[in-house]
Amino acid sequence: MRHKSIFSFGYRWVLVMILALFFAGTGCAPLGPPTIARDRFDYTTAIADSWKRQMLLNIVKIRYGDAPIFLDVVSIINQYSLETELRGTFGWSFPPNANRQEVGGAGRYYDRPTITYAPLTGQNFARNLMTPIAPATVMSLVEGGYPIDLVFRILVHSVNGLQNQFGGSARKHYADPEFYQLLEKLRHNQMSGAVALRVKKEENKGDLVLVFRKQGKKEVEATGKEIRRLLGLKENGNEFRVVYGSAPASDEEIALLTRSISEILSDISSTIEVPADHVAEKRVPPTMKPEGEGIRGALIRIHCSREVSQDAFAAVPYRNGWFWIDDRDYQSKKLFSFLMFVMTLTETGGKDGAPIVTISAGG
């Protein structure tokens, strides 16, 4: 009996040691690396979705005369902790009238995300939303490959006095017929590679210059001539300074009266579908009727319904209804994403940087 008890105790002790080694090995396994791929993509998706919804909601609020509010994600700090504990109790007597063995364990896992938000207010609000976009930014987008007709249609009030359409309630008006003609000609020359930009250094000052390249193609030359006529530029000129303003100082300048982000959102909001009873009750002005299709019409189609669409690219609830962009409307999706990209170009300060994901993982 004595040998059996000793053997039984030894067997249990070996079992306890095996369990202890198992828990120890589990506790020492690295926790941080496996979380990187998961957290990086999960947080990226969450931030992108919330950004789209915030932008869409603010456009809808402007449509109803409500104040837009932008809340930026400044930082994301996520802390992980995995704790393990092993307990063992052994007791015996000799002669073996009684014995007792107890093995126990405990584990705790913590996931503590800390997200910091910063509202866009005061000087930062005025600088980012109320300041007109610089002509250099507008032309850089064109040089970067964005269609010049869409860039001008969204970001510019006028070019050398030719008025663009504007849906803002303060000074709503349709575009001059020549404005759309200008956009068509500029787009044609952009596709042919006949339009280029460069910065011309003169007296320690950089001037943005729009260049009409000579290609020897009669159709391109004729289009360039028509562009000069519409803008009142020098007939035989090939280089023209691009400046901010409502009117050029000479026939060698192209004056762009650009819009602010606030004005862009106001113009986009004017074409949102709204319930007829809201218009009848004067809660919101009537939807601005488009002048045509393409750049003459609604650039971003935002629909309204009582129930949320199951095929929405972005959707937000507002005033007992849902406003949404159809995921099958590629043009609206593309321009909506372009609008969010333009807004990032106007962010000149007021934040500590882009959203930061910091992970502290311990075992």
Image (cartoon, rainbow, N blue to C red):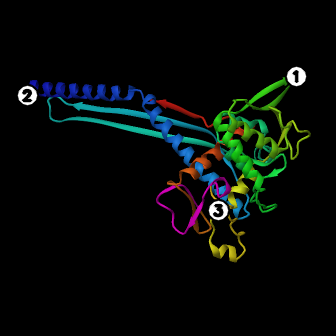
Q: Amino acid at mark 2?
A: Met
Image location (x, y in percent) of residue 294: 63, 54
Q: Which mark is residue 240?
A: none
Residue at left offset 87%, top offset 23%: 202
Q: Between residues 353 and 162, which one lies in front from this camera angle? A: 162
Quadrant location of the C terminus in the rendered image: top left
Q: Which mark is residue 1?
A: 2
Q: Amino acid at mark 1?
A: Asn
Image location (x, y in percent) of residue 187: 67, 42
The segment highlighted magenta reads 294-316
> Looking at the image, is mark 2 or mark 3 earlier in the sequence?
2
Q: Amino acid at mark 3?
A: Ile
Q: Spot the residue most to the front.
A: 218
Residue at left offset 68%, top offset 66%: 287
Check whether the beta carbons of the residues at disc 1 and disc 3 lie within 8 A of each other.
no
Q: In the rendered image, which residue does mark 1 sit on?
A: 204
Q: Nearer the viewer, mark 2 or mark 3?
A: 3
In the image, taking residue 296 as reference, residue 334 lies left or right, namely left
Q: Is residue 301 visible?
A: yes
Q: Between residues 312 and 121, which one lies in front from this camera angle? A: 312
Residue 304, magenta (yes or no): yes
Q: Is residue 119 visible?
A: no
Count of numbered tags? 3
Say what secondary structure mark 2 lies in: loop
State the CA–CA distance, disc 1 to disc 2. Answer: 102 Å
Question: How many residues crowd mark 3 within 10 Å: few (<14), some (14–19), many (20+)?
Answer: many
Above or below, 96 relative to 329: above
Q: Nearer the viewer, mark 1 or mark 2?
A: 1
Residue 275, magenta (yes or no): no
